[in-house]
Image: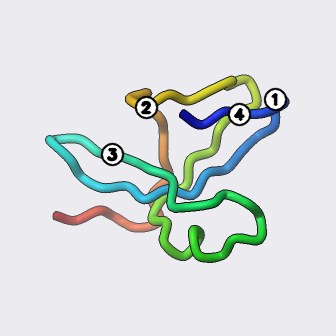
Amino acid sequence: MRRICNGVLEKLHLIVEKSDGGFNARLSGSQKSGSLRPMTLANGLMVVPEDVEEIKTGDKVTVELFEPIIG
């Protein structure tokens, strides 16, 4: 579970993979502003609106992919 703090717009770098006819997404690593490696590993970005308090495992989310997922 990823907690969203203080009603701030948050952008999360994700690794998105095909799975069982759908997709699974997970954080690509630390989301701190100085962490470059997670940004280079990510193939998608999720923008979390200010009014979202939490995202739980299994929740459906909208992700902007950097490139198509093939396979």
Say which of marks 2 and 1 sits in front: 2
What residue would you read off at disc 3?
A: 24
Mark 1 in CB contact with mark 3 (< 8 angstroms): no
Which residue matches tag 2? Answer: 57
Residue 71 percent location from the top left of the image? 16, 64
Q: Nearer the viewer, residue 16 or 69?
A: 16
Residue topped by disc 1: 7
Q: Residues within 10 Å of mark 4 (few under 14, many from 20)?
A: some
- State whether residue 10 is above or below residue 57: below
- First in residue order: circle 3 vs circle 4: 4
Q: CA distance from mark 3 to mark 2?
A: 10 Å
Name above or below for residue 27 compared with residue 51: below
Which amino acid type is marked by label 2?
Thr
Q: Label 4 is placed on what type of residue? A: Ile
Q: Are marks 2 and 1 in contact (CB under 8 Å)?
A: no
**Mark nearer the N terminus (4 vs 2):** 4
Q: Nearer the viewer, residue 3 or 67?
A: 3
Q: Which residue is mark 4?
A: 4
Say which mark, if any, is on residue 21.
none
Q: CA distance from mark 2 to mark 1?
A: 20 Å
Q: How is the image coloured?
A: rainbow
